[in-house]
Image: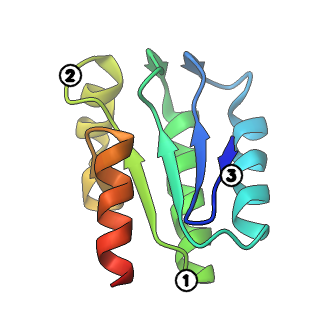
Amino acid sequence: MEITQTCGTLTFPEEVDLSNGEAILEQAERLLDSGIPALIIDLTQCAFCDSNGLNVITRSQMRASRLGVPMWVVLPQRGLVRRVSDVAGLQRRVAIAPDVETARRALDAARR
């Protein structure tokens, strides 16, 4: 987790599954409840993400929306996690960026 003046960033571990999904969701909820102005969920280092990881993203988006906090998901353009996300239709539910810098620029542009 990283918190700056402009956003909080939650970095997923290499694997997200039943064993750690709830703990990651709790981290996301703590970030959102702390009053951050925006949230970035970074899946850059994540090599495996099952439905538990997608659940974390979806539930985080729902909470962020209720709180009025913009949220972006950083998702590499290739790899297993991207394929799973595409099949699940994640891009229809959340804003997707190819890297953290792109997500930060999008958040900055939205604030203007």
Query: Disc 2 marks which residue?
Result: 78
Residue 106, image x, y percentages: 30, 63
Earlier in the chain: of badge 3 and badge 2, it is 3
Task: Please name the residue shown 25% across and 27% down the image.
Answer: 83
Q: In this view, does 66 lie above or below 52?
A: below
Q: Which residue is labeled 3 in the image?
A: 28
Query: In this rendering, would 89 be left or right of 15?
Result: left
The span from disc 3 to disc 1 (Cα, nearest Å) is 15 Å
Badge number at residue 68: 1
Q: What element carries label 2?
A: loop
Left or right: where does residue 26 sit relative to residue 97?
right
Q: Quadrant location of residue 39?
A: bottom right
Number of numbered discs overlaid on the protein picture: 3
Task: Locate residue 7 relative to residue 3 in the image: left or right.
Answer: left
Query: The C terminus lies in which quarter of the figure?
Result: bottom left
> Residue 37: where, in percent of width, then height?
59, 73
Q: Which one is in front, 103 or 5?
A: 5
Query: Do the numbered discs 3 and 1 sit on residues whose CB atoms are within 8 Å?
Result: no
Q: How crowded is mark 2: few (under 14 residues within 10 Å), some or many (20 or more)?
A: few
